Image (cartoon, rainbow, N blue to C red):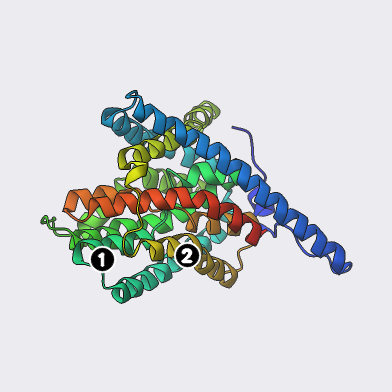
Amino acid sequence: MTGAPAAKAVLGPLCPLPLAGGRGACKERGSAAMEGFFNALSASLVLLMLMSVGYFMGRLGWMTQREKNFISKYVVNIAVPCNCVAGLLNNLDHDSLAQAALMVVSGVLGVGATLLISLALAALLRLPRERWGVFVAMAAFSNTLFIGIPVSTQLFGEACMPYLMLYYLSNTIYVQSVGLLLVEHAGTKPGGKTTLKSFLKDLFSKPPIVAVLFTLLLLVLDLRLPQPVMKFAGYVSDSVSPLALLYCGFIIYEVGLRNLRLMKGLPTMLVMRLAISPLICMAFCHLFGMTGLPRDVFIVESALPVVSQVTVMAGAFGADEQYAATGATLSTLASFISIPILMLVIG
């Protein structure tokens, strides 16, 4: 892992407008937007190729449910926590913590607003009970790990990691509370009663959350980890993107491309997840004065496919698992078109 720019430099505007020479400024911004668009196209192609490896490994029988479970456990419990430690300590410092707290608040409010609109849309669509909660969870929550890390690191480099993890923290608070309750309500199987104690236990037993909080504590105390530990974390974190994309490719194989169809509510969910959600995030970033790299990372993270836990929870609680899996797959494939367009917009 190489050192990234200091946090203060990253938190400033990405491309400030000059006071004079308006035409030149517009031309520069236009060329920067096109450059971002083509970079996003290139990144999407790389990510699609990596996902296709997972897809064809499934078709050839080289990857089964056993390997899928291994990748999921390794990425979530080992690789992503190392990624958190390396990304946060390399790109944030003690002086930037106040700004980091404001970013988390911005993320929490943005995801909350997206959730409220998703609830209203579900009511308007009059979806059946087994799909209602699944629809809301799919429309409201973003896949910040398995898709978010590969996409953002391809677009912005390793310097994006602290902001990605701050958005992950904002998103996960909802996924583990409201998301769980929504899918459980849509299911036919009885679920355990969700209490504040069980919610906190589930939230703070997740290795990525623990890693984020541990690293933030180190930053508060202005402490650093030994260099060998940081190198170890860097090496392990490099495995996140390829393995996460293999996992996503295998899920597409499991669903089956021939089985993909636009069931009722899925077109609305796709528009909400890939278009409306980033607009809401953009508004809250503007409200909190976020600019440059932090703003761009938050917007991209808010515009990613359906969070992978929705399909798992739908199966566990007896909700419409096929509906959830189809929505997750369609949103993943559609995001490789929407993300380059989004990069052109945010320029």
Numbered disc total: 2
Question: Dot 2, crowdedness within 10 Å: few (<14), some or many (≥20)?
Answer: many
Instruction: In the rendered view, tell whether residue 229 sits above or below residue 313.
Output: above
Residue 269 lies in quadrant: bottom left
Q: Quadrant of residue 128?
A: bottom left
Which of these two is toward me, 81 or 38?
Answer: 38
Q: Residue furthest front?
A: 258
Q: Residue farthest to the right?
A: 21
Mark 2 or mark 1: which is in front?
1
Which residue is depicted at the point 32% across and 46% down? 259
**In the rendering, which numbered label is found on residue 132?**
1
What quarter of the picture does the C terminus occupy? Answer: bottom right
- Residue 97 located left or right of residue 110: right
Q: Residue at x 83, y 65 (%)?
A: 18
- The location of residue 99, given as percent across then percent down, is 57, 60
Q: Residue at x 49, y 34 (%)?
A: 50
The amino acid at mark 2 is: Ser
Residue 135, image x, y percentages? 31, 62
* Whether residue 157 is situated above or below residue 191 in the rendered picture: above
**In this view of the protein, which residue sits in the foreground, 104 or 51?**
51
From this view, report whether residue 272 is shown above or below residue 88.
below
Residue type for callout 1: Trp
Q: Is residue 270 shown left or right of residue 151?
A: left
Q: Quadrant of the N terminus?
A: top right
The residue lying at 39 percent from left, 44 percent from top is 208
In the picture of the structure, the residue carrying the numbered disc 2 is 277
**Residue 131: % across, % down:** 24, 62
Residue 120 vs residue 101, the one in the foreground: 120
